[in-house]
Amino acid sequence: WLSKSDDVASRILLLEEFSFQEDRKLVRNLVVPTGNPDCDFKACGMNKQTPPIQKLPPDEIRRCMEPWKCVTIVTKTARRPHLVVRLAQSVRDSYGDLPIAAFDDGPDDYSEDIRQNISRYPLLNYVVGDDEDYGIA
């Protein structure tokens, strides 16, 4: 279905460019001792390697046999509903109908034809922002 986003709930906090550049300068000039002679990057010591993921024992593995109950596809777009419809058709062809949440920066001035195409996919939730571009996509 085609719906509008909540103006207040969907706002993204925009950083002032100057503050962003100042923070970036601090990080760029940061020198962290690495303890690794092979690393010649100034901030090598900031990146910590994560331990490998431990596999679950076989008796603890639970497989999802019905993907529509455990998978939701989430995508963003900027005024390209035809590509979201193409995605929905590709998913349908490959896996059957799966829930899809698509977020569009809007505004919502789509033709009836586009709305009909979107409505062919009952598990496609197409959310369009108001007429202000919040930069979601």
Image (tube, rainbow, N blue to C red):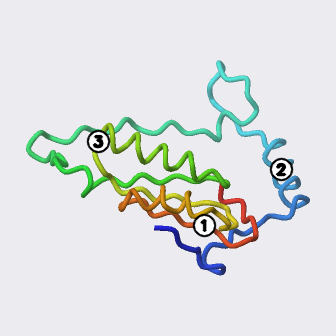
Q: Which mark is residue 7?
A: none
Circle 2 crowding by C-alpha within 10 Å: few under 14, some 14–19, many from 20: few
Measured Cα–Cα span from mark 1 to mark 3: 26 Å
Most distant residue in the top direction: 38
Picture quadrant where residue 125 is located: bottom left
Picture quadrant where residue 5 is located: bottom right
Measured Cα–Cα span from mark 1 to mark 2: 37 Å
**Quadrant that contains the N terminus:** bottom left
Amino acid at dot 1: Val
Q: Is residue 100 left or right of residue 40?
A: left
**Quadrant that contains the C terminus:** bottom right
Q: Residue at x 63, y 63 (%)?
A: 110
Most distant residue in the left direction: 59
Of helix, strand and loop, which one carries label 3? Answer: helix
Residue for badge 1: 128
Quick one: 121 or 38, which is closer to the camera? 121
Residue for badge 2: 26
Amino acid at dot 2: Leu
Picture quadrant where residue 123 is located: bottom left
Measured Cα–Cα span from mark 2 to mark 3: 47 Å
Q: Is residue 107 left or right of residue 56?
A: right
Circle 1 crowding by C-alpha within 10 Å: few under 14, some 14–19, many from 20: many
Counting from the top left corner in percent of width and height, residue 108 is at 65, 68
Look at discs 1 and 2 and give the one toward the viewer: 1
